[in-house]
Amino acid sequence: MYRIAVAFVLGSIVGLAVGSPAQRLQPLGDLFVRLLEMIIVPIIIFTLIMAARELSPANLGKIGGQVVCLYLATTAVAIAIGLGVSNLIEPGSSVTLTSGSVNTQQAPPLGEQLFSIVPTNPISAMAEGNILAIIFFTLVFGLGMTIVRAEAEPDSAVRSGIDTLFETAEAGAEVMFKIVWGIMEYGVIGVFALMASLFGEIGIEALRAYALLAFSLAFAISLQISIVYLLVILRGLVGASPLAFLRGVKEAMVTALSIRSSSGTLPVSMSNADENLRIDDGVYGFSLPLGATINMDGTAMYLGIVAVFAANIADVSLTLAQQFSILATALLASIGTAGVPSASLVMMTAVLTQVGLPLEVIAMIAGIDPLLDRLRTMNNVVGDLAVSTVVGKWNDAIDLTAGVWVDDPSEGGSVPSETPTD
């Protein structure tokens, strides 16, 4: 990804230096976009089936149900915040993209958007690229597999067949990630070409669009963390100190900022939950690994912001129905987003395709994605730990008299330390 960042910078410099002749490089960038389009459907199917496997009936008891519902709720709020902030700041409004294809003129009304989530023909939905319908069917199919597997006899052919399907999906996902790696290797050329073409056409004004995009994400994340996690969840639902919580998760936050991977941060997150936040392992042992798989608040928020960014540079206005479609697609797509660096670039194709916005935008922002990805990953990790804390509180599975919860300066004094009992 850092080579793509270098290609981003060099392409921008070439475009500014050469001017309009740099647009002749556009076909090299168009090939990169077509390669991204090629992998949309298979990667959605494989990754969502893998995510559904984590939601087995055995795990979805009282605690599991609370965790999943909270993850979905915080993600939906994150997307709404991202859309609200980007509509207010309007990143990309100073730039007009003329080379990308746009197909948002005949967006259906909101009611039709809701019904279209359920496909009448899943195969047709895949052929037509109806992303919401594909995601819905894949999740239903994956959950159906987990239920049938749980009900089947241990040595039955049915259970063996479902295990084979899950293993096939896992293998397919690994293959797709390898293909993504290859595409991103070519992306060095594709991003260079698209940046040269963009800056050759628009000039220095494009830098303002990138600055507003980065600011929109940073501002939206600050709202999500301060209001949703700290004020509503920690102060409101847990009744604990937000500052104490931040002290307890600081190692996980720093790690997430450093390595840009929710999955890679998982050992640190679990250590913080256990030693600092004093959450029982029966809660965090389920909530944190699941969160690293399906809870991508920062990623989902970013998908919404990029959609508005793409609409602005394509000079189109998104209707309420289209923004609802973005929210629904980003919410469902985030479930299948791998907790690895810059995985959101792949899921971004699903969101933009759903509302007919140009995929060239993905290549345009790929160069600055490593920086923005750090912020998104940190948001994801903090969200996982905040949800784990409140679920621990609701189930008497957290010790608020030990760890970071004592001697908290934000409470105006110290609380006598008690020795926790195991």
Image (cartoon, rainbow, N blue to C red):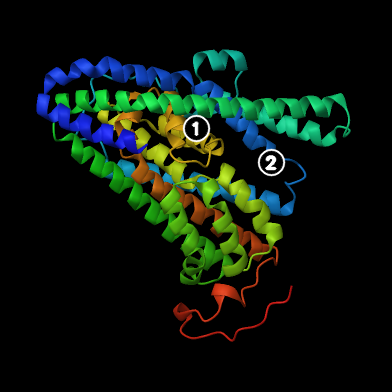
How many neighbours does mark 1 have within 10 angstroms: few (below 14), some (14-19), or many (20 or more)?
many
Asked whether residue 393 is in view, the answer is: yes
Residue 365 or residue 352, whichever sits in front = 365
Q: Residue at x 42, y 52 (%)?
A: 258
Q: Tell me the SS state at disc 2.
A: loop
| Amino acid type of the residue that numbered disc 2 sits on in the rendered structure | Leu
Which image quadrant: the C terminus?
bottom right
- Against 138, residue 278 (above or below) is below
Which image quadrant: the N terminus?
top left
User: Quadrant location of residue 135?
Assistant: top right
Q: Residue at x 73, y 40 (%)?
A: 56
Q: Tell me the SS state at disc 1.
A: helix
Please tell me whether mark 2 or mark 1 is closer to you in this view. Answer: 2
Q: Which residue is mark 2?
A: 55
The tag earlier along the polypeptide, 2 or 1, is: 2
* Left/right of residue 93 with respect to residue 165 in the rendered view: left
- Against 222, residue 326 (above or below) is above
User: Quadrant location of residue 419?
Assistant: bottom right
**Residue 376 point in image, percent of width and height:** 42, 47
Q: Residue at x 54, y 71 (%)?
A: 240
Residue 169 is tagged as none
Residue 329 is tagged as 1
**Residue 244 point in image, percent of width and height:** 49, 71
* Left/right of residue 231 with respect to residue 46 in the rendered view: left
* Left/right of residue 18 with respect to residue 359 in the rendered view: left
* Left/right of residue 384 with respect to residue 409 in the rendered view: right
| Amino acid type of the residue that numbered disc 1 sits on in the rendered structure | Thr
How many neighbours does mark 2 have within 10 angstroms: few (below 14), some (14-19), or many (20 or more)?
some
The CA distance from mark 2 to mark 1 is 19 Å
Q: Residue at x 59, y 86 (%)?
A: 416
User: Quadrant location of residue 123?
Assistant: top right
Residue 87 or residue 43, whichever sits in front = 43
